Amino acid sequence: MEHLRKAHMIELLAQGRRLDGRALLDYRPIDIKCNVIQKANGSAQVSLGNTQVIAGVKIEVGAPFPDTPDKGLLVVNAEILPLASPYAEPGPPDEDAIELSRVVDRGVRESDMVDLSKLVLIPGQKVRAIFVDVSVLNVDGNLIDATSYAVVSALLTTKMPELEVTPSGEIKEKDSMIPLPVSKIPVSVTFARIGEAMVVDPDSEEEAVMDARITLTTVDEGHLCAGQKGLAGGLTYEQIMFAAETAKIKGQEIREIIKKAVGSVG
């Protein structure tokens, strides 16, 4: 059945069409709602077609990593809820959820979206720690991009208490809230190679038959800051260059959607 479905899909792709009627470089509708979790420092819920993801940000005071005493912490964790997919099971994160959090974490980290050097309270001892927890509510393909947009939108709307360090080294919380020191908006664009065709934003049906997957993340200037290759199938040099150029164009389109959603937050 999978072979027949793939053959039909490849026949359509050769004509520039997809099973759901999209062109090869069309994304499904993207909807972003911010500040959806009251107790979080920042949050966002993203719908990418029927894929739904929610991200919440929690900021605490903690110790820096030993190898980066001059930087705050940023940790992204993701879980796929059992209700989100018939293939998801209760328990610790499986390898898919681990890869999801690592790819998204890398895109945010390598973009230098958050200036972690500004989160140091006492060098080598106390820093602000940013924890981003992601829950996948429904799986219908392209979890990486949906999760990335939710995490980035949540970070852009995050507010944290202003802190001061007394001469005795005590950390006191002020009444005012301040935003995270963010300066860039990383946007991931995920491609699936199905046969010889390259498509963006693969849905579940396309992911079931794709030969290879590649996710490229760009920052505001269009520069590539991170990439992740998935599955065993290969990509030609031309396909990689095509993906890189397309990621810049689609990334800018999606960046404007994120800006609009974040800008609508009062």
Image (cartoon, grey):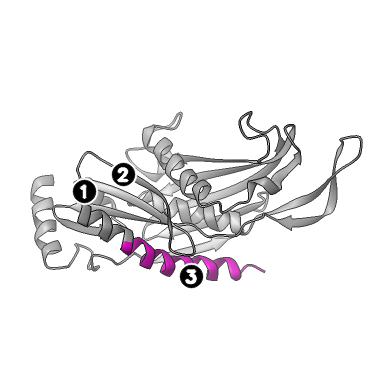
Residue 218 pos. (x, y %): 43, 58
Quadrant, the N terminus:
top left
Secondary structure at numbered mark 1: loop
Name the residue: 35% across, 45% down. 228
Q: Counting residues from the N terminus, which is met first, the one under dot 2 or under dot 1?
A: 2
Query: Pointer 1: what residue?
Result: 235
In this rendering, is residue 183 above or below 87?
Answer: below
Magenta residues span 245-266
Secondary structure at numbered mark 3: helix
Name the residue: 35% across, 43% down. 85
**Which of label 2 and label 3 is nearer to you?**
2
Residue 105 pos. (x, y %): 49, 44
Name the residue: 22% across, 58% down. 198
Q: Is residue 54 magenta?
A: no
| Alpha carbon distance from label 3 to label 1 | 29 Å
Please state which of residues 143 and 118 is positioned toward the viewer in this rendering: 118
Q: Counting residues from the N terminus, which is met first, the one under dot 3 or under dot 1?
A: 1
Residue 121 pos. (x, y %): 77, 41
| Alpha carbon distance from label 2 to label 3 | 26 Å
Q: Amino acid at mark 1?
A: Leu
In this rendering, is residue 89 above or below 118?
Answer: above
Quadrant, the C terminus:
bottom right
Query: Pointer 2: what residue?
Result: 229
Q: Based on the displayed image, in which of its 4 quarters is residue 9 positioned? A: bottom left
Query: Pointer 3: what residue?
Result: 256
Q: Residues within 10 Å of mark 3 (few under 14, many from 20)?
A: few
**Which of label 3 and label 1 is nearer to you?**
1
Q: Based on the displayed image, in which of its 4 quarters is residue 244 positioned? A: bottom left
Labelled pair 2, 1 in contact (Cβ < 8 Å)? yes
Q: Based on the displayed image, in which of its 4 quarters is residue 102 positioned? A: top left
Q: Counting residues from the N terminus, which is met first, the one under dot 2 or under dot 3?
A: 2
Labelled pair 3, 1 in contact (Cβ < 8 Å)? no
